[in-house]
Amino acid sequence: MFNEVGTGKFGAALGTKKPTVENVDDQLMYEAIYSCPINDGITIIPLVYFKEVTGSYNETALMVKSSFSF
């Protein structure tokens, strides 16, 4: 996570599901997340990820998480 990007925190990740093997479909996933505090007790966390499978399909998703604390 990178602290203090705008009013929140930004993070990114890159990973694979299994070790890379020759002549097998590779699986690679990219992810970006931003944590944005709305006020003292509420935080909104949007997330986007992209899953890439060589020779097969690609998948993209957008998610939003909200956290409340009292």
Image (cartoon, rainbow, N blue to C red):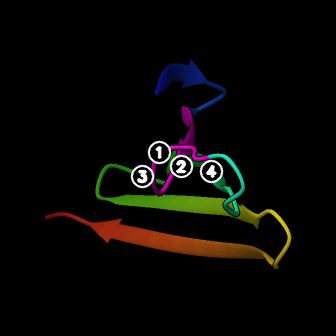
Circle 4 residue: 31
Residue type at the position of mark 4: Glu
Q: Earlier in the sequence, mark 1 or mark 4?
A: 1
Distance of label 4 from label 2 (alpha carbons): 12 Å
**In this view, which residue lies farthest toward the left?**
70
Q: Nearer the viewer, mark 4 or mark 2?
A: 2
Amino acid on which the number 3 mark rests in the picture: Asn
- Pointer 1 residue: 19
Q: Nearer the viewer, mark 4 or mark 3?
A: 4
Q: Residues within 10 Å of mark 2 (few under 14, many from 20)?
A: some
Mark 4 / mark 3, whichever is N-terminal = 4
The circle on residue 39 is 3
Dot 3 alpha-carbon crowd within 10 angstroms: few under 14, some 14 to 19, many 20 or more: few
How many angstroms separate mark 4 from mark 3 (CA)? 25 Å
Residue placed at 53% from the left, 20% from the top?
Answer: 4
| Residue for badge 2 | 16
Q: Position of residue 39 (x, y in %)?
A: 42, 52
Residue 50, horizontal then vertical, whole percent: 73, 62
Q: Which residues are magenta?
A: 9-21
50 vs 15, left or right, is: right
- Residue 26's image quarter? bottom right
Magenta region includes residue 41:
no
Secondary structure of residue under mark 1? loop
Q: Residue at x 53, y 49 (%)?
A: 16
The quadrant where residue 70 appears: bottom left
Q: Nearer the viewer, mark 1 or mark 4?
A: 1
In the rendered structure, which disc, 3 or 1, sits on the residue that comes first in sequence?
A: 1
Q: Give coordinates of residue 54: x percent, y percent.
A: 80, 63
Q: Position of residue 64 (x, y in %)?
A: 56, 73
Horizontally, is 43 left or right of 14 in the view? left
